[in-house]
Amino acid sequence: MTTKSPDEKPAAKIDGRARRRLESMARIQAVALDLFEAQGFEQVPIEAIARAAEVGPATIYRNFGSKERLVLWDEYDPMLLEAIAAELAEHEVLAAVQRALVGSLAAIYRDERARILRRGRLIRATPALQVVAAADAVMLRVALEQVLLASRRAADPLAARVFAGAIVATIVAGVDRWLDGEGREPLARCFQRTIAHLRRLALA
């Protein structure tokens, strides 16, 4: 999961031109993953990826910004934030998060299991990617704070920060469990387990 550039839209709302751009980005990412797995992340320059993908280096920099973003890019964070916001209108925070995670991310992780596993393995093996992924988690937390404040489920900015931090940590733990099992356990079940632990902590 990563934070998106401002011009990217959730998949359900994009037009044909934006859809073609996303498809092109997914293809370039797949080419990059092939090269990184074969040669190592540090050993593959952007120019080699561009040649293999039959695009110019400028296209890669324009769409992704950096080599790290080639791995970390996906389309999912805006979808997750919208789903959480919608669920918060009718449910308390943890129920809303669980419903949003199971309803949006779990289906995506099932349908795109192979690509997400490849990205997860590479991130775990590459310190440079872990640094950027950690920064992305902070950006997701900040975006989630705003969702919680807008929904009035958090009484003040401090409460929103605490709630958002716990939710992001819970998401990361669920994805880590899914990766540990090479995607064999359904992600929805991984999220249900991690949220159950968070509920126990709240009651402790």
Image (spheres, rainbow, N blue to C red):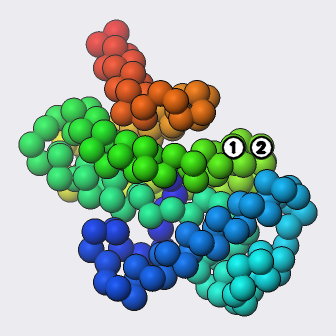
Q: Name the residue under label 2.
A: 125
Q: Is mark 2 on a helix, strand or loop?
A: helix
Q: In this view, does 114 lie to the left or right of 60?
A: left
Q: Residues within 10 Å of mark 2 (few under 14, many from 20)?
A: few
Helix, strand or loop at label 1? It is helix
Total marks shown come to 2
The residue under label 2 is which amino acid type? Answer: Ala
The vertical placement of 165 against 72, above or below, is above
113 vs 79, left or right, is right
Which is more toward the observer, 83 or 22? 22
Q: Is residue 79 above or below residue 67?
A: above
Q: Are marks 1 and 2 in contact (CB under 8 Å)?
A: yes
Q: Where is residue 145 in the image (x, y as percent from the top left)?
A: 34, 51
Residue at image point 90% right, 63% down: 43
Write the residue at 49% across / 75% down.
23
The reply to whether residue 164 is visible in this rendering is no
Question: Where is residue 59, by image quadrant?
Answer: bottom right
Q: Is residue 109 left or right of residue 83?
A: right
One can see residue 203 in this view = yes
> Looking at the rendered structure, which numbered label has been put on residue 121?
1
Q: Marks 1 and 2, how far apart in space? A: 6 Å
